[in-house]
Amino acid sequence: MKLLQLLPIGDLDTRLLNALGSGMASILRIPCEIATTRIDPEFAYHGERQQYHSSELLHAMQAHVTTESWRVLGVTTVDLYIPILTFVFGEAQMGGPCGLVSAHRLRQEFYGLPTDSEILRQRLLKEAVHEIGHTLSLTHCDDSQCVMAPSHAVEWIDLKASSLCEPCQARVLVR
Ligand SMILES: [Zn+2]
Ligand SMILES: [Zn+2]
C-alpha cells in the first residue's frame, strides 16, 4: 500500500508533525510516514517580499516523490506566497502528487494572541487535508463546514471541519 509522506521543509516541531501525521492517517484512512529527508527552503526566499515562493517549493518537492508515495505533503513554518496574493496557507498540484502547507499564519501568535498549540494543530490538520483534497482533484466546496471550503483567513478555517462533506467524499471515491 502506498503512503502519505510528510516532508519537512525547514525546521519543524516533531510533536506538531507527528500529531499531523496521525490526524491525517485517521481522516484519510491511509498509512502516513514522516520523511527522513527534508528540504531547505532558503532557495525559495524572496527578499523583496520577505516570504517564500510556494510554487518553487512545490516544484522542488517533486524530486521527493517515490514509487512508495501516495501523496507527498510538504510542511513548513515559513511564510508562503504566490505572486498574485499577499500570502497563501498552502498550495497543491491539482490531481497530485504534491501539496504544501505552512503553519506560519495558523499560529495565534501571528495575530498577537497567546500561543495555543491545540488550535494550531487543528488548523494545520484542516489545511493539510484541504491541500490533499486538491491533489485528489477536488475544487473548492460551497459547504462552509467542508474541509474543501475556501479559507482566506484563520476564522474561516476555525469554522470548518477537518473532513470532507459527503458530496466531496463521493467525488473522491468515484475516481
Ligand atoms: Zn484550496
Ligand atoms: Zn465539500
Image (spheres, helix red, strand yellow):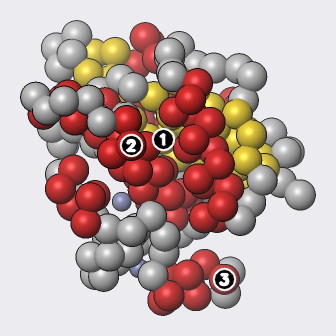
Q: Give the Cα distance between marks 3 and 1.
A: 23 Å
Query: Which of the 4 image quarters holds residue 139?
Result: bottom left
Residue at the spot 28% in from the left edge and 58% down from the top edge: 157
Can residue 170 be seen at all in this image of the molecule?
Answer: yes
Looking at marks 3 and 1 on the same chain, the residue that comes earlier in the sequence is marked by 1
Q: Is residue 27 left or right of residue 109?
A: right
Q: Amino acid at mark 1?
A: Leu
Question: x%, y% of residue 56?
Answer: 44, 29
Q: Is residue 106 left or right of residue 117?
A: left
How packed mark 2 is, by other alpha carbons closer than 10 Å (few <14, some 14-19, many 20 or more), is few
Question: x%, y% of residue 80?
Answer: 31, 31
Residue at the spot 51% in from the left edge and 64% down from the top edge: 133
Q: Amino acid at mark 2?
A: Glu
**Residue depth check, mark 2 versus mark 3: number of the one nearer the observer:** 2
Q: Give the Cα distance between marks 1 and 2.
A: 21 Å
**Residue depth check, mark 1 versus mark 2: number of the one nearer the observer:** 2
Q: Nearer the viewer, residue 116 or 4?
A: 116
Q: Give the Cα distance between marks 2 and 3.
A: 30 Å
How packed mark 1 is, by other alpha carbons closer than 10 Å (few <14, some 14-19, many 20 or more), is many
Q: Nearer the viewer, residue 175 or 107?
A: 107
Find residue 173 and name its label: 3
Question: x%, y% of residue 148?
Answer: 39, 69
For mark 1, what is the residue? 100
Above or below: residue 42 compared with residue 120: above
